[in-house]
């Protein structure tokens, strides 16, 4: 019998940065866990720590979508996103440990919001210009 494989903990239990605007939540996952399960845990965290944000009041799992940014082609400035499928296990979703996963909400009109990527360097520059740093 072969000895047990020495698995990197980050492969077996990767964590991801779930982002929406300036908000970032860190969730450790199991590689066999489905993305639907991860999304449900994200909702639990938002309910617990949402700070009374009305965007999260009464939010259900079917009104949250998880998306990742696709690699950009050289010379292409357009940002493309790919939706993550609920039934896919984390380990089979093409994600890497510590990757940013954006969560977007479905509005009352049925439209999905666009992912908001915050350029923290620009924010830091603005704060310095305003004398906040």
Image (spheres, rainbow, N blue to C red):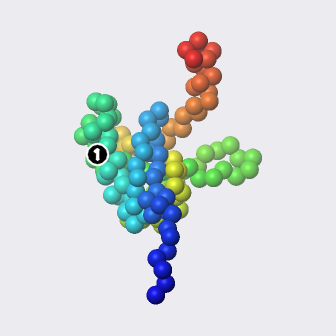
| Circle 1 residues within 10 Å: few <14, some 14–19, many ≥20 | some
Q: Look at the picture and state if 34 lies above or below 131.
A: below
Q: Residue at x 58, y 33 (%)?
A: 119
Q: In this orientation, which residue lies closer to the viewer: 6 or 118?
A: 6
Residue 84 x, y percent position in the rendering: 45, 57
Q: Secondary structure at mark 1?
A: helix
Write the residue at 35% across / 52% down.
Answer: 39
Q: Nearer the viewer, residue 51 or 20?
A: 51
Q: Residue lying furthest right in this view?
A: 75
Q: Quadrant of the C terminus?
A: top right
Seen in the image, is 37 located left or right of residue 16? left
Residue 26 rendering spot, x and y as whole percentages: 42, 45
At 52% across and 55% down in the image, what residue appears? 97
The number of discs equals 1
Of the pair 43 and 27, the residue shown nearer to us: 27
Residue 51, by quadrant, is: top left
Q: Nearer the viewer, residue 98 or 110?
A: 98
Residue pushed farthest left?
58
Left or right of 124: which side holds 91? left
Residue, disc 1? 44
Q: Does residue 128 appear in the picture of this structure? A: yes
Decide if residue 85 is in sight here: no
Q: Is residue 37 left or right of residue 91?
A: left
Please state if 99 lies on the left or on the right of 53 as rendered.
Answer: right
């Amino acid at each position: 019998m072969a000895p047990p494989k020495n698995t990197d903990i980050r492969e077996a239990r990767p964590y991801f940065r779930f982002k929406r605007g300036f908000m970032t939540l860190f969730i450790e996952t199991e590689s066999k866990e489905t993305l639907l399960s991860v999304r449900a845990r994200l909702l639990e965290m938002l309910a617990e720590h949402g700070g009374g944000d009305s965007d999260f009041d009464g939010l259900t799992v079917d009104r949250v979508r998880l998306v990742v940014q696709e690699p950009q082609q050289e010379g292409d400035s357009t940002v493309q996103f790919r939706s993550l499928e609920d039934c896919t296990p984390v380990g089979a979703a093409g994600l890497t440990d510590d990757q940013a996963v954006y969560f977007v909400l479905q509005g009352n009109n049925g439209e999905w919001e666009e992912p908001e990527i915050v350029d923290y360097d620009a924010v830091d520059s603005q704060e310095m210009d305003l004398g906040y740093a």
